[in-house]
Image: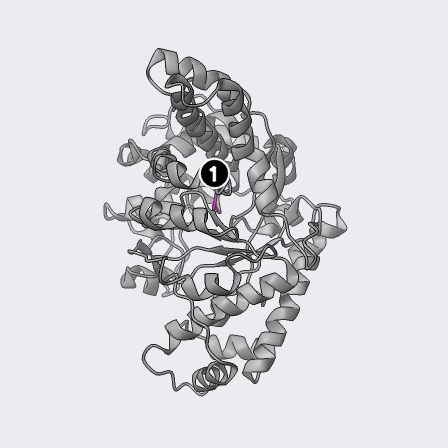
Amino acid sequence: MHEDQLLPAEPGVRAIARELYRHAKDLPLISPHGHVDPAILADDRPFPDPARLIVVPDHYITRMLASQGIEPAALGVPSLDGTAVQTDGRTIWRLLAANWHLFRGTPSRLWTERVLTEVFEVQTALSVRTADEVYDAIAARLADPEFRPRALFERFNLEVLATTESPLSDLGAHAKLAADGWGGPGGRVITTFRPDDLVDVDWPGWEDRVAQLGAGTYAQFLDRLRERRLAFIAAGATSSDHGHPTAATLSLSPGEAAALFDRARRGRVEPGDAERFRAHMLVEFARMSVEDGLVMQLHPGAVRNHNAALYARHGRDVGGDIPGPTEYVRALRPLLDEFGTDRRFRIVLYTLDETVFTRELAPLAGGYSAVFLGAPWWFLDSPEGLRRFREAVTETAGFYNTAGFVDDTRAFCSIPVRHDVARRIDAGFLARLVAEHRLPLDEAAETIADLAYHLPKRVFQRTVHNGVTQ
């Protein structure tokens, strides 16, 4: 990697960016939102072969290859319908190498190449000719104890890694991490409360999951959710996460909510019920956040399982989701009317719809003390997406109504790479402000350190009733 990768091309601005980047590059990593399996760190076993580590779980990679007609089964993605799945890691790796040209200009190539060079110290460029050489070099590293998950965690300079679990999780991996001194409040690996599978009545199996929660009535449903939130807090959680189709919020009366819940329990959902229940539950979760101090995150706008054939063959979270347009101003008003200026409440808003950054999200963050803007997410988590985000929101929301970078990844080894990309992009943005005499260099240096480390640490800390932080 060139030392100036992603920094501005103009020499004068690049020199300023280099200076600013030095203030951020070695700061510890705060990863407050992600999807790494906590068992990876709890068990601390050697990673599997290079393909199962880098290709199979990464739907950024498998999605691009599927767009060119390469079936996920050929890349080792587990099948739900009995389709034969490739199990030979070297064969999968060779298929990636043969199609590496598809990733030119994409963040997937940037991340993967930097994982190879910086994490696994492989300097050979990936190609058809070098596929086996690169594979063998990574495999040799994976056999070394210094490349086991906990050793890499230390090398990555990770201070906190948040994972994401359903309320139905027994949090067993987190219990093991806590016993080993890695988890729990103040630990290095913490959980995040993600209740989507219990509030989306359209999600197949909802009734069974509610029964598993132990909720026969709506009042019991709320009580069991509060209890599970406390269990998550005991496992270190400082936030909840909500991945709803829209940002809609709604305050139903207890009677209306109970009637809707009962209809769903009997399998008699009426048109609009699912959206109304999800919207109502966002307000209820905000109320719970005021009670227990969990920071609320909202990730709306993903049209889930848009590729029906892919979903039928491989299930959820394998690259079949598509972003949709999202409205926030009217959608969030019921929630913000109740909690938008409550100092005990914080909500971090994300989007897959760039058209709302300037028009809706930045003004909302500037208008409500409880609202913070989350980093560009998923399809927007790229060098250009990160630049557009800063350009779109800074004039209205400033830097300090944003919540810092989140890597939002299942790919453990890409975490330090993704954070470094964000720090380089911020260095370039701030360097331009300095070069244009809009911001003194010392303030820009302070700002980049805040964006990289201090802001996420502050925003995602849990608060309690009396406003004292924990």
Q: Residue at x 35, y 34 (%)?
A: 391
Question: Which quarter shows the N terminus?
Answer: top left
Q: Is residue 393 above or below residue 122?
A: below
Q: Residue at x 46, y 17 (%)?
A: 18
**SS at circle 1:** helix
Q: Residue at x 42, y 33 (%)?
A: 111
Camera sees residue 124: no
Colour scheme of the rendered structure: one colour
The residue identified by callout 1 is 50
Q: Position of residue 244 (x, y in %)?
A: 41, 62
Q: Position of residue 253 (x, y in %)?
A: 49, 80
Q: Position of residue 273 (x, y in %)?
A: 38, 78
Give whichever of 32, 91 is nearer the camera: 32
Looking at the image, residue 219 sits to the left or right of residue 106; the answer is right
Q: Is residue 136 above or below residue 195?
A: above
Q: Is residue 407 above or below residue 197?
A: above
Give whichever of 423, 145 is nearer the camera: 423
Q: Is residue 406 magenta?
A: yes
Looking at the image, residue 158 sits to the left or right of residue 321; the answer is right
Structural crowding at the residue carrying mark 1, measured as other residues with C-alpha within 10 Å and reported as few (<14), some (14–19) or many (≥20):
many
Outermost residue toward the left in this view: 68
Which region of the structure is painted magenta? Answer: 404-409
Q: Is residue 143 magenta?
A: no
* Amino acid type indicated by mark 1: Pro
Q: Position of residue 426 (x, y in %)?
A: 44, 29
